Amino acid sequence: MSKQLKLGAFLFAPGNHAGGWRHPHARPETDMDFAAYAHLAQTAERGRFDTLFFQDSAAVPADTLADGGRTGFARATYLEPLSLIAALAPLTRHIGLIATVTTSYNEPYHVARRIASIDHISGGRAGWNLVTSQIEDEAGNFGLDAHLRHAQRYARAEEFHDVVRGLWDSWQDDALERDKQGRYFDPAKVHRLDHQGQHFRVRGPLNVARAPQGHPIVSQAGASEAGRELAARTADLVFTAALTLEEAQAFYRDVKQRARRHGRDPDHIKILPGLLPIVGRSEEEARAKHQRLLDLLPDDLGIKPIARLAGDLDLTQYPLDGPLPELPPNNSAHGRQQLLVDLARRENLTIRQLARHFACAGGHQVVYGTPQTIADHMQAWLENEGADGFIIQFPFFPAPLEEFVEQVVPELQRRGIYRTQYEGATLRDSLGLPRPAHPAEVAR
């Protein structure tokens, strides 16, 4: 059997394109409309996607507040992802439900409890996208004057993950007896964590039984050195950004090799770059649709799509039509900053051109063409070890998702590289990942 693509639908309302919400066919009110999210979830499930994927930030970015989202991504209000995936669970049957939760502004017990609960509610389809937060504005919502430094965030995240995973193993699979003639559970099969670390002290046990998946899926999106190490040690799925096959192959090899060094099977970590497809029934139609989206970007877009990645450097002091200057290290997203610099140097782009590129898909690749052209691109990356699949992004909602499901999915299925039916009941089944045994069972 040929390698099979894994696909996630990135439901980033009102859209991944900074001007997409202005499109005549866009429904920007999707950001707060649960019925619209339900339609998107059911459409993606009809397209046999592995999972839905929801981003989150616990703040409205300052630059968005400053101009009402007119010259940058309009995303300012949207439903909280954990609440959303819990509500979507009974309206879907097979598709995974991954929500972003930051380790910088939460506590491990809360996260372990909520995601394990959603895994039970969904019958084993929950996932946690572990992030350390990029938006520095979040700090002010949690009693801090400044965002934690990058190294500190990742040290906290590593310990945070270990505590969550330990709490998920509080109960052995058969600990609950519910014997009406005797005891409710076997106390020998319930384990306190008693964790005492640099960042957390957590007693346990969790008051949720072991999840259907054992451990819900863990996703990670960091591309820095610290992010790659965290992903290789902890993640089942890695959401990354790569603009060329060569970049993708280098990242793919690196993370898989790191996973092996951590004693993991490299096949048990799935690498999914972001991809924003623009589908046309002809190349000309696709090109015209792409141009229409570009025309929706405001003329005074400026530097906003990339300003956060410039660190302490004020890019407004440099000519928009000049080259990108050397950037100091930032405290936001090291990997994404490096992608920006590499793209600028490789293609000799001006600051204006870089900003417009990032406004189209947040720095991810944009591919436009017929279903065959887009399938060619995806198949090439799959077969040449640039990706195990893709996180599919959409410029607005709902039409681009519907077009992908109706036009691209059948082409992928015709080629034998994408499922026609779900393989099992859980997200682990869909991704082809084993259910982890409880440590007490392994020790026997």
Image: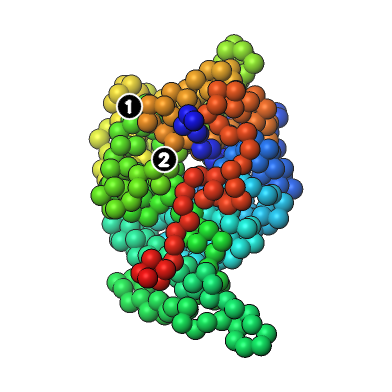
Q: Which residue is under mark 1?
A: 246
**Is residue 323 something one can see in this rendering?**
no
Name the image quarter holding residue 82: bottom right
Which dot marks residue 271? 2
**Is residue 173 something one can see in this rendering?**
yes
Amino acid, disc 2: Ile
Q: Nearer the viewer, residue 338 or 212?
A: 212
Q: Percent x, y for residue 126? A: 56, 55
Q: Percent x, y for residue 280? A: 62, 18
Q: Who's the residue at 42% across and 68% down the image? A: 441
412 sits left or right of 33 in the view: left
User: Taking 386 as reference, is 435 above or below it?
Assistant: below
Amino acid, disc 1: Glu
Element under disc 1: helix
Q: Percent x, y for residue 319? A: 35, 28
Q: Who's the residue at 34% across and 61% down the image? A: 158
Q: Count the labels in the image.
A: 2
The mark closer to the camera, 1 or 2, is 2
**Number of residues whose C-alpha sits closer than 10 Å to that of mark 2, classed few (under 14), some (14–19) or many (20 or more):** many
User: Taking 299 as reference, is 49 above or below it?
Assistant: below
Q: Nearer the viewer, residue 7 or 148?
A: 7
* Mark closer to the chain start, 1 or 2: 1
User: Taking 365 as reference, is 272 above or below it?
Assistant: below
Residue furthest out toward the bottom:
182
Name the image quarter holding residue 107: bottom left
Q: Nearer the viewer, residue 264 or 349?
A: 264
Q: Percent x, y for residue 66? A: 52, 46
Measure the alpha-carbon separation of dots 1 and 2: 14 Å
Q: Nearer the viewer, residue 434 or 84?
A: 434
105 sits left or right of 282 in the view: left
